[in-house]
Image (cartoon, rainbow, N blue to C red):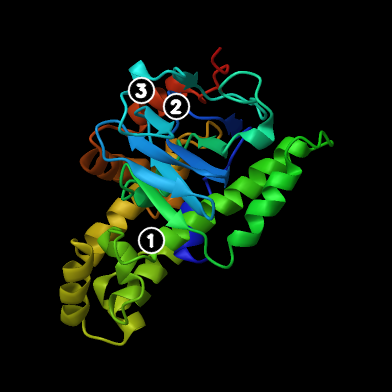
Amino acid sequence: MDVFDELLRGVRGRGAVFGRSVLCAPWSLRFTNGAYLTLCLPLRGAGWIVPEGGEPLRVEVGEAAIVRGPAPFVFTDDPSEGTAARAGGVREVRWGQVRDSGAASGSVPEFDCATVLLAAAYDVQEQLPQRLLRALPPAVVVPDEEDCAPLRDYLEAQLGRGRPGDQIVLDRLLDWMLVCTLRDWFDRPEANPPGWYGALGDEVAGPALRAMHDDPAHPWTTAELASRAGVSRTTLAKRFTELVGDGPVAYLTEWRMTLAADLLTRPELTVAAVARRVGYADAFGFSAAFKRVRGESPSAFRREAQASGPVEAAAPAG
């Protein structure tokens, strides 16, 4: 499996659409849903994303914005004005499933309003995708590339059709749009992905990384990983550490603990079963490694994960 696919397979919308907003100036939407990621797609017109404590970013039709939570942010037509003092007021938006909100400034016909925004929220609880998503800035704006652009019109056409399975269709379309946008962002020169992401394309470190991702439970040694790249152990260790920041064995341990953290949220798996899945012969050795890397025992991590439970969608504000 491609590493990018593997990392993002847990990013799935479940009732993700929470707003199709028809916006007539002056307007400001304050998103307080606390989602891990929010995807903003202007279907018509443009606006400004204003992250909490960050610089405004303009987003237009043909672009997508991704905002990393859980801090609130504002989507507005004029970032130069204080949102609290705006004549049109500020609408609070929380995670829900309201698709057509109508005009933000009274009962104005939709065609008289300059901007239509589609927003979707993602609650990413899995550790695996967070390895990549933590590298995102607070907000990014990405132009549609060829493989993403045709999806926008089709996505809008599906809104409000009221057919059976409508929400599932919208969730999967938005998943596609989100992954397209993330892939395009990490390919851009201004992106700052983690070292291991760039190292995947390296002729020395790349084969070793892919081998560890493909079979994390295998008892890999530096010598065996070096043979995958056709280099010496010294060459692999030096190049790997330069690009990734850790040696191959340290990276493998951290990768296994990331996988284990997600497996521990599954109540049907014992700690010993999780240990075997990530390459440890017994629970004792696994528990020691998990606590060293993550600062708590597997049992404590599991209790905390079970106590937090799944995050439910909040009702839309006002």
**Residue depicted at x 43% and y 45%:** 66
Name the residue carrying label 1: 186
In the displayed structure, 42 sits above or below 191; it is above
Q: Looking at the image, do the residues carrying marks 3 and 2 touch, with CB atoms under 8 Å apart?
A: yes
Q: Is residue 97 left or right of residue 214?
A: right
Of callouts 3 and 2, which one flags the residue occurring earlier in the amino acid sequence? 2
For this orientation, the residue located farthest to the top is: 318
Residue 104 visible within the image: yes
Name the residue carrying label 3: 83
Q: Amino acid at mark 2?
A: Ser
Could you say which is closer to the camera, residue 296 or residue 90? Answer: 90
For this orientation, the residue located farthest to the bottom is: 230
Of callouts 1 and 2, which one flags the residue occurring earlier in the amino acid sequence? 2
Question: How much space separates mark 1 and mark 2, taking CA atoms?
Answer: 29 Å
Q: Residues within 10 Å of mark 3 (few under 14, many from 20)?
A: many
**Looking at the rendering, which quadrant does residue 112 occupy?**
top right
